[in-house]
Image: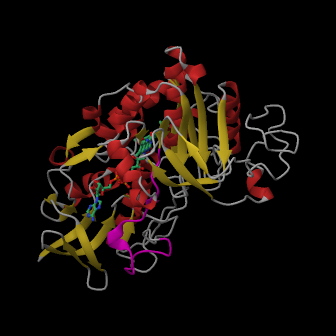
Amino acid sequence: TKRYKLAIVGGGAGGCSTAAKFANKLGKGRVVVIEPSKYHYYQAMWTFVGAGIEEVEHSARPMKKVLPKAADWIQAGAISFDPENCSITCSNGDKVEYEYLVIAMGLKLDFEKVEGLTDALANDDAVCTNYTYEHCTKTFKSLQNFKEGNALFTFPGQPVKCGGSAQAIMYLMDDYLRKANKRDRATIIFKSTAAALFGVPQYADTLNTLAVDRDIDTRFGWNLTSVNSEKKRGDIQWQRWRHFSDKEVALCFCRRGPSGCVTSTLCRRHRMACNGQCAYVRSPGYWSNYSFLHVVPPMMGPTELQGSSLAGECGFLDVDKFTLQHVKYPNIFGIGDCTNIPTSKTAAAVACQSGVLRRNLNSVMEGTNEMRKYTGYTSCPIVTQEGKCLMTEFDFEGNLLETFPLNQATPRFTMYHVKKTIMPFLYWNMLLKGFWEGPAFYRKMMRLGFGR
Ligand code: FAD
Ligand code: UQ1
């Protein structure tokens, strides 16, 4: 058994930045990071890898290089938690006891939930996903191999990390096919469990217009349940996910047809005039075929938390969404994708949370209990073509928290530059080293201290 002042489970964006903040402060040998992976991944780059714009190797660095030297690293997974006795068992047999614990294990991709998907990803040239290091290079190959037919893009039920990536690769494929003079051979379809392209109306509006302009068909309320890659051109099965209430479809923009919402082209003029039916999509059956299929796998809370007193109902770490402190155990905090904080799961959210966590964990260690509150800040950059990006930024309520003094609801080259060049630098050199706690300071500065 090893004893530490602070144990951190996970060395991803959240774990690594937290370790950097506390390792020097608490001193050598007092902080441990429990993390099984040999490499740390900058996942936000995978969208570009899938589109053939970046090299996959640039998204990985050895874990040893990114974790702070002053912290110990146990290269193993945490397999069980005993929060009553402040101890953790690791997959290599080590037992760790802690005074304080930060859980930053990320989330699990649940490929098995879609029947046949694992097999199709391994064996069908037309099926791909940008959501793992191993698969994202295949996306570009599938794209290059595409000849004609349906190009389908899925979006599973929530929670989904960086939901914008599901459509970014679609816009990049559209762009690629146009440049290759092949766009007229493709029917591009976004088939989503959600009710709209985005949960924030200002951004959804831009994306809807864009989908109309670029002849992209959007179908809401559908969930991919199985992929049959044995058949020649592939068959996939869908499940009616759910019908949406009037309130939900207020965000959704109608496809006008003779009976309201049955045609497959979005109507720009009527997009606000939804009569509450537009989640009902006419379907020739529950099966469709594909010549290209980009899947966003279903996601779930870390398996090691399931059934423990740490997880909430949905299987994610049960923390207070404002303070990031565990609801039952005051010496435990959570950060990032593994938590049940109701905001869009992104590295941008992790950055902002890391500042709140630093202050609040310090307060608890010092016994002052002065707690800062997380606003829910998150940012999801949606690349809309090579050279253009929509930089979304918002809080728990969907209020905009935009950094730049421009209209961010317009896709811009400057924002593409931010996503492509500035973000990797910020991620590796600032966030992981504990120096980047989100753009709040710059946002306020740009507004000369006025506004949110
Ligand atoms: P992760 O960074 O995933 O780290 C979790 C760590 O926990 C991993 O290192 C893992 O090995 C470790 N772990 C797992 N199980 C255990 C265990 N049992 N014990 C110990 N350790 C364990 N975010 C943005 O802000 N902007 C973007 O543009 C963006 N684009 C994205 C594009 C794609 C394709 C994807 C997949 C994600 C994107 N994201 C983006 C989301 C972002 O990558 C995540 O939200 C972020 O990495 C979350 O950080 P985390 O620390 O919670 O989890
Ligand atoms: C961000 O802070 C961040 O973490 C480093 C990302 O991860 C890659 C992001 O994608 C974004 C958009 C932010 C937010 C920062 C700004 C300046 C909008």
Answer yes or no: is residue 336 visible: no
Q: Residue furthest front?
A: 231
Residue at the (78%, 57%) spot, across then down? 247
Give the quadrant of the N terminus: bottom left
Please check the rendered image and state whether residue 210 is part of the magenta-colored stretch, yes or no.
no
Label tally = 0
Residue at the (44%, 61%) spot, across then down? 113
Please check the rendered image and state whether residue 305 is part of the magenta-colored stretch, yes or no.
yes
Query: Which of the four quarters of the rendered structure image does ligand 2 lie in?
Result: top left
Q: Is residue 148 above or below residue 124?
A: above
Q: Is residue 51 left or right of residue 83?
A: right
Q: Residue furthest bottom?
A: 84
Q: Is residue 196 above or below residue 308?
A: above
Question: Magenta segment, principal secondary structure?
Answer: loop
Q: Position of residue 381 (x, y in %)?
A: 51, 37
Tell me which segment is drawn in magenta: 295-314
Q: Position of residue 50 (x, y in %)?
A: 39, 33
Please identify the quarter of the rendering in which residue 25 is found: bottom left
Residue sitting nearer the eye, 332 or 200: 200
Q: Residue furthest right?
A: 258
Residue at the (38%, 41%) spot, across then down? 124
Residue sitting nearer the eye, 141 or 192: 141
Q: Is residue 25 above or below residue 399?
A: below
Q: Is residue 80 left or right of residue 209?
A: left
